Amino acid sequence: MGLVDPLPGVLARAVDALRSAGVPFAVSGACGVYLRGAGEAVETMDIQVPPADATRARDALAAAGLHPDPSEDRRPVVRDDEVRIALVFRTDYLPVTTERLARSDHLRLAGVEAPVLCATDLLVDELLIADPLQLDFTRLLYTARILRGQVDWARLDAETAGSPYARAFLGLLGDLGIRSRPTAGTGS
């Protein structure tokens, strides 16, 4: 990014466009983590929307001057000169639901208020993609340490219980004192 961070301006345009179109949404991914106080400024913004609203969201963002990016075939993507916005209607393992979006908190960045996915859901998303090819706990350790007071650990344990990588990471957090160790058989 240049000397001036373009993220607040693009975030403001996206939030205004999606609200005006009546599209339910929440900022997620690395940008959501950044808005919650962990991580660095980003050039990519993930915005979760219910599957039924993905096309309407893309059209609203395009009408706000963000250009569709046809190079992405997996999900709708728009961009301005410096920031890319991916519309996520299904994470790798979970569909985006209105219930998930309702758990978001409204946070501010440079005067722009936006719904941001709750810390627990941000970590669920990160942990469920962990596999032998995507197993970098360095960034996740930093994120979990910063967000630990915002996380519902029992829900995180329950929603990631099927992943051996998530269980290993959550055990590591207990060993490092970032969270209390789950009690065997209780999940919390």
Image: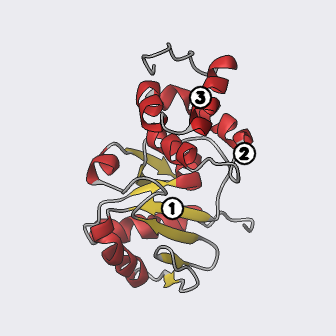
Between 64 and 147, the residue placed more toward the observer is 147
The answer to whether residue 29 is above or below residue 74 is above
Residue 170 in the figure: left or right of residue 137: left
What element does badge 3 sit on? helix
Above-or-below relation of 60 to 133:
below
Q: Is residue 154 left or right of residue 83?
A: left
Q: Position of residue 57 (x, y in %)?
A: 35, 73
Most distant residue in the left direction: 22
Could you tell me residue 106's position as x and y percent?
Answer: 39, 46
Using a 10 Å C-alpha cutoff, classify the residue at mark 3 as few (fewer than 14 neighbours), some (14 to 19) or many (20 or more): many
Mark 1 and mark 3: span between their CA atoms?
24 Å
Q: Amino acid at mark 2?
A: Asp
Question: Which sits earlier in the primary sequence, circle 1 or circle 2?
Answer: 1
Q: Amino acid at mark 1?
A: Asp
Pointer 1 residue: 46
Residue that mark 2 sits on: 136
Q: How many marks?
A: 3
Sort mark 1 into few (<14), some (14-19) or many (20+) by Cα contacts within 10 Å: some
Q: Which dot marks residue 164? A: none
Which tag, 3 or 2, sits closer to the chain's start?
Answer: 2
Color scheme of the displayed model: secondary structure
Q: Amino acid at mark 3?
A: Leu
Viewer-side residue, 73 vs 152: 73
Residue located at (58% from left, 84% from top): 71
- Compute the Cα span from label 3 to label 2: 14 Å
Q: Which mark is residue 170?
A: 3
Label 2, secondary structure: give it: loop
